[in-house]
Image (cartoon, coloured by chain):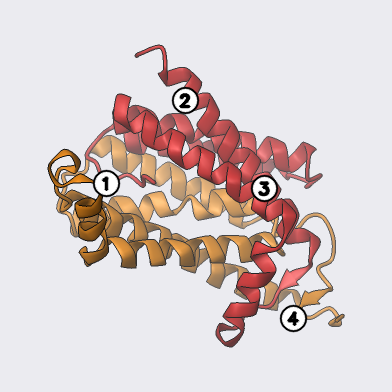
Chain colours: A red, B orange
Amino acid sequence: MSAMEWPLILIIVFASSTGDVLCAKGMSQGGELEVRLSKIGSILCYIVTRRMVILGGSCYAVAFFSMLALLSIAPLSIAVPATALSFVLDTIGARFLLHEHVPWKRWIGVLCVTAGVILTVKSGGGGAPTP
Amino acid sequence: MIRTKAPADRLVIKTAIFVAIAVFANSFGNLMLAIGMNRMPDFAQVGIPGYLLHLLANPFVLPGALVMAVFTLAQLSLFSWADLSFVVPCVASSYVVTTLLSEFILEEPVHVQRWLGVLLIVAGVALVARTPENTKDEPSEVHRS
C-alpha cells in the first residue's frame, strides 16, 4: 500500500460523512418534502438554495474526486471497503451531531451492512458501485 | 403550511418507495456509467475535445449521469423526513442489487464470499428497517413548493 492511500481514504470517509450530515441537516430543517413530478423544477430550486445542502454537496465533490485519485493508485477491492467505514461515521454523526436516537437494532444493522460491503467487495468479481 | 398528522402508514409507504427509487437508481446508474466508461477511447489518443465529444455521444454516460441525479434527488428527499442513520444503511442495499446485476447482466462470476456479504447486508438492512424512520420529532410540517 502506497503512502498516499491512507490520507486519501481518510479524506473520502470524512468528506462523504460530512456531506451526508450537512445534507441531512439542511434537508430536515425545512420539513417533509412533498415530491410531485409536476413540481420538480421548484423542488430543485428549493434544494440548491439551502446553504447546508450546498456545503454538503461540496463535500460530496471532494469525496468524489479523492475517490477517482484513490482508484488510480489502489484496486477497487481496497478502495470500496475502506470507504464503507463512512457508514459507521455517518451513524456516529447522526447520533451526536444531528441528535438522532439510534436504537440498538440500527447500530447492529449498520455494523452488519458495513461488514457485508467489505466482504462483497474484497472477494472481487468487479461490478461494485464506484463513483 | 401545516398538515394534521396523517396515519404513520403514509410515511412508511412513502419511505419505502423513495428507498426503492434510490437503491435502483444508484445500482442502474452505476451499471450504465461502468458500461459507458468501458467504451471510452484512450484519453491520451483523442485529446480533451475528442474525449468530451465521445463522452457526449456515448449512449450510456449521459443517461447514466441522469439516473444518478434521480438517486441524489431521492436521497435528499428522504433526508427531509427520515433519519440519516436510517437512510444510509437502507440505501446501502444497492450493493446487493449491484451484485445481482453483475451476476446476471454482466455475467461476472460471483464468489461464495460475496454472496455471504450480500446476506449480511440484507440482514443489516432488515434490522434497520424495523426501527422507526424518524426518531427526532413528529413530522407535521409538509413543505409545498
Q: Nearer the viewer, mark 4 or mark 1?
A: 4
- Provide the secondary structure element on which disc 2 rests: helix
For the residue marked with disc 3, what is the amino acid?
Leu
The reply to whether discs 4 and 1 touch (Cβ–Cβ < 8 Å) is no
Name the residue type under label 2: Leu
Question: Residue A27: x percent and y percent?
Answer: 71, 60
* Secondary structure beneath label 1: loop
* Residue A74 visible in the shown view: no
Tell me the crowding category of disc 4: few under 14, some 14 to 19, or many 20 or more residues within 10 angstroms, Cα based. Answer: some
Counting residues from the start of the chain, the first of labels 1 and 3 encountered is 3
Please state which of the two labelled residues, at mark 2 or mark 1, is closer to the viewer: 2
Chain letter of mark 4 equals: B
Q: CA distance from mark 2 to mark 1?
A: 22 Å
The CA span between labels 1 and 3 is: 30 Å
Badge 4 vs badge 3, beta-carbon distance below 8 Å: no
Identify the residue under disc 4: B144
Task: Name the residue tied to disc 3.
Answer: A55
Task: Give residue A61's position: percent from left, percent from top.
Answer: 52, 44
Counting residues from the N terminus, which is met first, the one under dot 3 or under dot 2? Answer: 2
Mark sitting on residue B126? none
Identify the amino acid type marked 1. Answer: Gly
The amino acid sitting under disc 4 is Arg
Q: Which residue is mark 2?
A: A8
Q: Nearer the viewer, residue A48 or B145?
A: A48
Q: For marks 3 and 2, give the one nearer the viewer.
A: 3
Residue B100: image quadrant is bottom left
Visible in this render: residue A120? yes
Query: Which residue in the structure is indicated by mark 1?
Result: A127
